[in-house]
Amino acid sequence: MTETREQKAQRLVDEGRVDIIEETEYAIQASVNADQRRYLTILYPNGRFWCECEWSRYHPNATDLCAHALAVKLAAERSNP
């Protein structure tokens, strides 16, 4: 069975695979160690994001976050309750 993006994001956070590099009022930059490789991911306060992953490349205007960006969001929320 395939994981949903939400399930994968939660697993990445639970397994400690999200390293927040920098968190400012303008963006959260993180490195996400996914199953196949490491992705640089940037999450912006307006809900937009940038990620090196293939899903993001093929869905550049998506309003849904890729699993990596969602993992960054979850990790940031966990560290700043």
Image: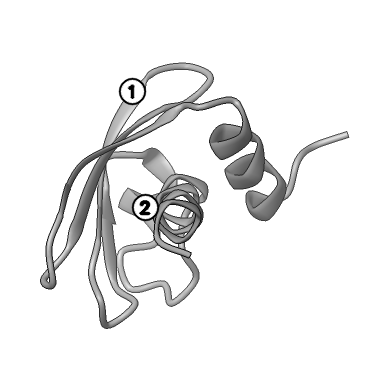
Q: Residues within 10 Å of mark 2 (few under 14, many from 20)?
A: some
Label 2 is placed on what type of residue?
Ser
Q: Image quarter for residue 8?
A: top right
Compared to residue 51, the image places residue 59 above or below, namely below
Closest to the camera, between mark 2 and mark 1, is 1
Position of residue 47 measured from the top left corner of the image (x, y, whole percent): 34, 77
Q: Is residue 29 left or right of residue 38?
A: left
Q: Is residue 3 left or right of residue 37?
A: right
Q: Residues within 10 Å of mark 1 (few under 14, many from 20)?
A: some
Compared to residue 53, the image places residue 48 above or below, namely below
Q: Residue at x 88, y 34 (%)?
A: 1
Q: Residue at x 41, y 72 (%)?
A: 62
What residue sits right under mark 2 in the picture? 56
Query: How many tags in the picture?
Result: 2
In the image as oriented, which residue stretches furthest toward the bottom?
Answer: 46
Position of residue 40 measured from the top left corner of the image (x, y, whole percent): 23, 37
Q: Residue at x 39, y 18 (%)?
A: 37
Position of residue 11 measured from the top left corner of the image (x, y, whole percent): 65, 35
Q: Residue at x 62, y 34 (%)?
A: 14
Q: Image quarter for residue 13?
A: top right
Residue 21 badge? none
Indicate the secondary structure of the residue bearing disc 1: strand
In the image as oriented, which residue stretches furthest toward the top?
Answer: 36
Indicate the secondary structure of the residue bearing disc 2: helix
Label 1 is placed on what type of residue?
Arg
Compared to residue 23, the image places residue 46 above or below, namely below
Precedes in sequence: disc 2 or disc 1? 1
3D distance between C-alphas at marks 2 and 1: 14 Å
Q: Please tell me which residue lies in front, 40 or 54.
A: 40
What residue sits right under mark 1 in the picture? 38
Q: Please tell me which residue lies in front, 43 or 81.
A: 81
Position of residue 64 measured from the top left corner of the image (x, y, whole percent): 50, 70
